[in-house]
Amino acid sequence: MDKYKKLASNTIIFAIGTFSSKILSFLLMPFVTRMMTTGSYGAADLIQQTGNVIIPIAFLCVNSAALRFSMDKAERKSDVFTVGVRVTLVGFFAFLLFAYPISLIKINDFKLGDYLVLIYVFVLTSGFRQLCQQFVRGSGHVKLFAIDGILATVTYLLFTMLFLGVFKWGVTGYILAIVASDFCSVLFFTVTAKLYRYVRFKGVRRQTGRDMLRYCVPMIPTIILWWIINVSDRYMVTYFVGSSANGLYSAASKIPNLVIMCASVFTDAWQLSAVDEYNNKDTARFFSKIFRVYCGGTFFVASFLILTCKIITKVLVADAYFASWQYVPVLIISTVFSCLVNFLASIYMAEKKNIMAMVTALTGAVTNVVLNLILIPRMGANGAAVATACAFVVVFLTRSRDTRRFIKINYQPVVLTCQTVVLVAQTVAALCLQGMWFYVAEALL
């Protein structure tokens, strides 16, 4: 199959699963924000984000190795999946040893120990779902991957309405809905992809395990650094301003996630094509052409969302959350550069060069933490949004320069700069102008 047709085909398949899951989750926002106060929503977000950073540490990012090594024809898929399962189980039991110190963590009015069991259950089910997802995807079962996205959406929708709407379980119900949906997803993959056939109790090649760990363990610092860039601001906002402010900030982040949703439809398919086509003669031309299309589409979606952010916020969240719109425009800019950074991650993945991925992420993490400490006490949650945007810009500039060692992509810097200036101007107009003048300025831009 022609490389462009293959990329387009995989993109369409991933779109079916991604759009269904992301859109319906997005449309649940009015219901969720009406069922939860800003404080409880902020607490639920911190629980979820805490679990998300524990997963790669406890499980050694083995899901990423499962994706990459299941794509290698020289590897036995049963060895790859078995190593993934073993690492996940051992990691979970090791994580149990840290229950007491985790229970002592308290951030302003939020105490992690109150939700300790919930965090452990979330980590286990989410970790196994990620492992199954990436293995199935790397094995070429992209249709199953897409169907799972639809299934996960339906189950999450049902469990959310049951636990929040009927049982009124609040924070606990919000997290349990995710847990139950992830568990259903694991069962689906186990049955449809017959994952049980890939579990070996003996005869696993030790070299495969060593190679997978050598690939994924260096990713742990990188994942932590990305967590610092993406999520540490939630903890700092909670510390400096409180859980209610973090609830508004978390709600605001859902709208920029539409950019990620649209981009992820492509990047899921792109990672497969990037590895397949990486060593061809016209690789640089292929990557440059795809980047231009990807970049243009990302900026277009971002521009539209900034233009309509007040309207979308009004429709999607309860009145108590409407003030969150003011954080949306800057967060959209940070999301755009996050998407561009993710595009370049495919080069490190193809090269299996995770060390430089970590180094480039470090520049963004340092930038983010320093600016958060400076800006949040002065600007509140908007300071966190500005810090995150600056961090992603720094990572993109660093990574685009470093990856030229492997492949010289034509980024069209003049066009990229002009696109960024337009988004910044739209953001200033959104935050400074009111009423009809805002829409006049946006239309001119």
Image (cartoon, helix red, strand yellow):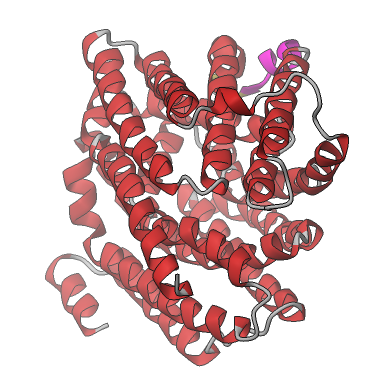
* Residue at (74% x, 77% y) in the render: 406
Magenta stretch secondary structure, dominant: helix
The magenta-colored residue range is 99-106
254, 291: nearer the viewer: 291
Q: Which residue shows up at 34% across the image and 45% down it?
A: 17
> Which of the 4 image quarters holds residue 11?
bottom left
Seen in the image, is 169 located left or right of residue 341? Answer: left
Q: Which residue is depicted at the point 24% across and 67% down?
A: 307
Q: Nearer the viewer, residue 194 or 398?
A: 194
Q: Is residue 66 left or right of residue 359?
A: left
Q: Nearer the viewer, residue 20 or 223?
A: 20
Residue 291 appears in view = yes
The N terminus is located in which quarter? bottom left
State whether residue 71 is above or below residue 118.
below
Q: Is residue 101 magenta?
A: yes
The residue at the far left in this view is 436
Q: Position of residue 13 (x, y in %)?
A: 35, 53
Seen in the picture, residue 312 relative to 403 is either above or below; the reply is above
Q: Position of residue 389 (x, y in %)?
A: 53, 62
From the viewer's perspective, tell me whether residue 326 is left or right of residue 385.
left
